[in-house]
Structures are given as structure tokens and as C-alpha cells.
Image (tube, rainbow, N blue to C red):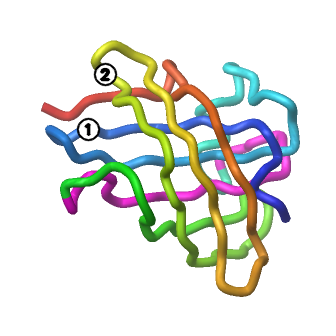
Amino acid sequence: MRAARDAWAADVLARAAELAARLVFVDETRLPESAAYECTAPNQGCPYEGIVGRVDCVGCDGNDLGPHPITMQSLQQNVTVQGTVTITGFTAPFSPGPGHITGSISTPDATVAGTFDNDFCLLLLSETI
């Protein structure tokens, strides 16, 4: 499955300058807002084929840009792979929102490979104080 399937959303949990990001890639031109929450994790009823990738901490090393480990899981199948997300452009999602993220995803065995360039999904942004 190719990660560059156009549509995705990002769920962001902010902790100062550090954040966790969830990237959702589906077989649609654009993920409809009505399906955004259902497609943020496997087995939540997402009506589309796709993957969700979780990056545990962007900015923990003091840099938003560059490579970060990512865990990707199929939304429809019981398949999980480890890979790398390389962030090449980043605008923080909260000051002001929605922010923007650009980069690429790859896995060692090329099961997943692709690029993305999108705004964060406003419906899925949340802050932890």
C-alpha cells in the first residue's frame, strides 16, 4: 500500500514544543471531515482502505524537521510496520491553527513509501495543558 494516497489527517497532542502526531492516509482524494475521527485508529469503522501512522514525539530532540520513527497500522487489516517519517516542512498547529506538515514516509522493506503536504485537520487538534 502506498502512503501517498493523497488524503490524511493529523491528530496532535501538544506538550510545549513537543507533540505527538497521527497521520492518516486513505484511498480518497480528501478525507471527509465526517469520517476523520473514525479513521484515526484501526477498528473504529473507517469506511476507507488506508493506514494510520503514529509519531510519538516531534520536537523532543529540539528539532521538528528531520527523521522520526513512525509506527504504521492498516485501518482494515491486522498489519503493523515500523518506518521513518522525514518532516521537511512544519508549521506548528496552534499558533495560529491549523498549521502545516510536509514530508515523506518509508519502511525498510518498501511496503509503505510516499510523500505528503497538507494542513492539520482542525477537527482533530487538541492540546493537553
Pick the residue in front: 51 or 116. Answer: 116
Q: Residue at x 59, y 33 (%)?
A: 37
Query: Nearer the N terminus, badge 2 or badge 1?
Result: 1
Q: Is residue 100 left or right of residue 105?
A: left
Membership of 53 in magenta stretch: yes
Residue at the far bottom in the pictured view: 109
Give me the disc on residue 75: none
Give percent across and percent down for residue 14: 26, 38
Q: Residues within 10 Å of mark 1 (few under 14, many from 20)?
A: many
- State the quadrant of the C terminus: top left
- Callout 1, which amino acid? Ala
Q: To which residue does mark 1 refer? A: 14
Residue 85 drawn above or below residue 25? below
Give me the disc on residue 94: 2
- Callout 2, which amino acid? Phe
Circles 2 and 1: CB atoms closer than 8 Å: yes
- State the quadrant of the N terminus: bottom right
Give percent across and percent down for residue 103: 58, 50
Image mark count? 2
Q: Residue at x 39, y 52 (%)?
A: 65
Whole-number angstrom distance, CA of label 2 to CA of label 1:
9 Å
Q: Residue at x 33, y 13 (%)?
A: 96
Give percent across and percent down for residue 38: 65, 37
Q: Element at badge 1? A: strand
Give percent across and percent down for residue 86: 52, 60
Q: In the rendered image, which quarter is residue 95 located in?
A: top left
- For the record, the magenta segment spans 44-61
Q: Residue at x 42, y 59 (%)?
A: 66
